[in-house]
Image (tube, rainbow, N blue to C red):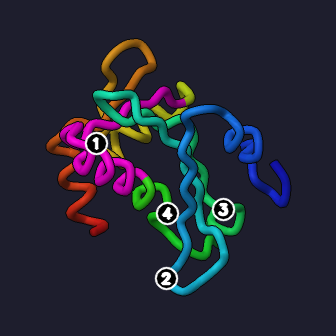
């Protein structure tokens, strides 16, 4: 949690069973976004997702970074035989945003998931 990042990624990295991935431009070294995933046995749990500080606001360098990372999680879910299913618990204020932008659905209180048909759309859009 430094250089403008909002989450403590060092702590996330040391949490057991968490798989951290970074998004970089092909051939580049600058991190554009980070995502923390966990394989549960039946779906992929998305614990954290964050775009790089230079990808926030009106002056962001790249658009679509979060969608790209969620599509990666969906792709991994298909590859693991989980039918594209990705589950997560967002901040309450972001629930409608995830419904509108990712096609996520609210499944219980503040638990959400990306269903198979939506996961296919995301993977096809980004890969």
Kindly identify the residue that appears in the image at 49 percent across and 41 percent down.
37
Q: Position of residue 49 (x, y in %)?
A: 56, 46
Residue annotated with mark 1: 103
What numbered label is drawn on residue 66?
A: none
Q: Disc 1 and disc 2: Cα gap in Å? A: 27 Å
| Tag 4–tag 3 contact (CB < 8 Å) | yes
| Tag 1–tag 2 contact (CB < 8 Å) | no
What numbered label is drawn on residue 52?
A: 3
Q: Nearer the viewer, mark 4 or mark 2?
A: 2
Image side of residue 104 versus residue 45, left or right:
left
Q: Nearer the viewer, mark 1 or mark 3?
A: 3
Q: Disc 1 and disc 4: Cα gap in Å? A: 16 Å
Kindly identify the residue that appears in the image at 68 percent across and 39 percent down.
12
Which of marks 4 and 1 precedes in the sequence? 4
Which of marks 3 and 1 precedes in the sequence? 3
Which quarter of the picture shows residue 2? bottom right
Q: Dot 1: within a 10 Å radius of its alpha carbon, few (fewer than 14), some, or many (20 or more) residues?
A: some
Give the residues in magenta.
Answer: 70-90
Q: Disc 2 and disc 3: Cα gap in Å? A: 16 Å
Q: Position of residue 63 (x, y in %)?
A: 49, 68
Label 1 SS: loop
Q: Dot 3: within a 10 Å radius of its alpha carbon, few (fewer than 14), some, or many (20 or more) residues?
A: many
Specify whether residue 49 is painted magenta. no
Label 2 SS: loop
Residue annotated with mark 4: 65
Which of marks 2 and 4 precedes in the sequence? 2
Total marks placed: 4
């Amino acid at each position: 949690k430094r250089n403008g990042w909002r989450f403590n990624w060092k702590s996330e990295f040391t949490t057991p069973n968490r798989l951290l991935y970074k998004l970089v431009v092909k051939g580049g070294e600058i991190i554009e976004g980070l995502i923390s995933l966990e394989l549960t046995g039946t779906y992929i749990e998305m614990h954290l997702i964050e775009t790089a500080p230079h990808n926030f606001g009106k002056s962001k360098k790249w658009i679509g970074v979060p969608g790209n990372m969620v599509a990666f999680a969906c792709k991994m879910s298909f590859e693991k035989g989980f039918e594209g299913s990705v589950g997560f618990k967002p901040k309450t204020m972001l629930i409608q945003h995830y419904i509108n932008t990712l096609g996520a659905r609210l499944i219980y209180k503040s638990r959400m998931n990306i269903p198979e048909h939506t996961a296919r759309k995301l993977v096809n859009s980004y890969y």
